[in-house]
Image (cartoon, grey):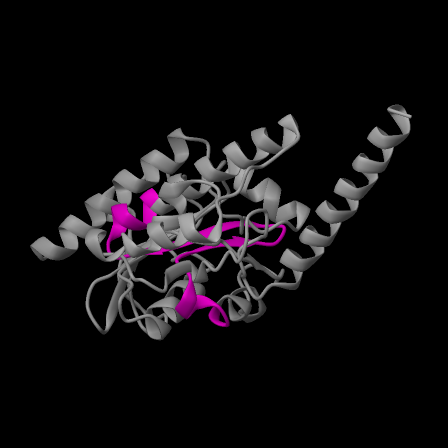
Amino acid sequence: MGNALFSLKNDIVEAGKRIYARGYVASNDGNISARVDDEKVVITPTGVSKGFMKPEDLIVINMEGKVISGNKKPSSEMFMHLQVYKDRPDVFSVCHAHPPYATGFAVAGIPLDKCVLPEVVITLGSIPLIEYGTPGTEEFYKPVTKLLKDYDAFLLANHGALTVGKDVLNAYHKMETLEHFAFIAFVAQQLGYINTLNREQVQKLKDQRAKYGIRTDVGCVSCQEEGQSCSTNSSAAKVDSDKEELIRKITEEVLRSLNR
């Protein structure tokens, strides 16, 4: 086994341990892969817990999904990973998991598209909601390709989350950031209000991306005014915005009636 491939397998095993330890997956859920070169990808096997993998469990496949080496069956969602690598030459790892809070937003049909946390605006930007497709089939990953060039993190409706990165740990860390943001957004919603950053504040954060080696256009963050959701080109984002506006109006009316 080449040193590069051995290193990639060890990184995937480590990322698998982390997503399992953090409760981002249950049982044998989730899948992680890394680009070996222009022709090969190493990916996690199906039917094996991500928290208990060994380097020899991982499978090397070509860009058509044919097994090159490995004794186990590759993830049933390998074609989603392969499509990402074909469409994004800059991506060298893909991480798919079911972190509870992020998946909760995905099940509720709510994208994480508000400009709230500086670190998230810089590293991820907006996180769009991808329409549902049957896992393990083409209809599962095809909707992702529509927005793939503009985002590095996605909520998969009624399924989970997907992140991509320059290496295995980078893709995994984006999953951590995504779930941390989802948890904070959930808490803020329970408290009754999410204070969003305004356009000037967001622009200052976007201007810092080059300093950290991050694509300036990632996440398509474009909050136009304080309190407005970031654009994701998602119909779900508009629905969520309409719901919030209706709730706000009802709340104001109730408060006015109580103060009369």
Relative placement, left or right, of 7 versus 181 is: left
Tell me where residue 109 appears, x and y as whole percent. Answer: 66, 51
Q: Which residue: 63% across, 49% down? A: 110
Taking depth in this image into account, of 105 and 53 the one nearest to the observer is 105
Q: Which residue: 22% across, 51% down? A: 212
Q: Which residue: 63% across, 26% down? A: 191
Q: Is residue 72 visible?
A: no
Tell me where residue 127 appears, x and y as whole percent. Answer: 49, 53
The residue at the far left in this view is 3
Indicate whether 74 appears above or below 90: above
Q: Which residue: 57% across, 66% down? A: 233
Displayed quadrant of residue 34: bottom left
Indicate whether 122 appears above or below 64: above
Tell me where residue 16 appears, x and y as whole percent. Answer: 34, 40
Is residue 169 inside the magenta stretch? yes
Classify the position of the C terminus by image quarter: top right
Relative placement, left or right, of 13 versus 143 is: left
Tell me where residue 208 appears, x and y as whole percent. Answer: 27, 52
Give the tally of numbered discs: 0
Displayed quadrant of residue 247: top right
Taking depth in this image into account, of 83 and 257 the one nearest to the observer is 257
Classify the position of the N terminus by image quarter: bottom left
- Point out the stretch of residues depicted in magenta: 145-173
Taking depth in this image into account, of 43 and 67 the one nearest to the observer is 43
Q: Is residue 247 visible?
A: yes
Relative placement, left or right, of 231 versus 91 is: right
The residue at the far front in this view is 260
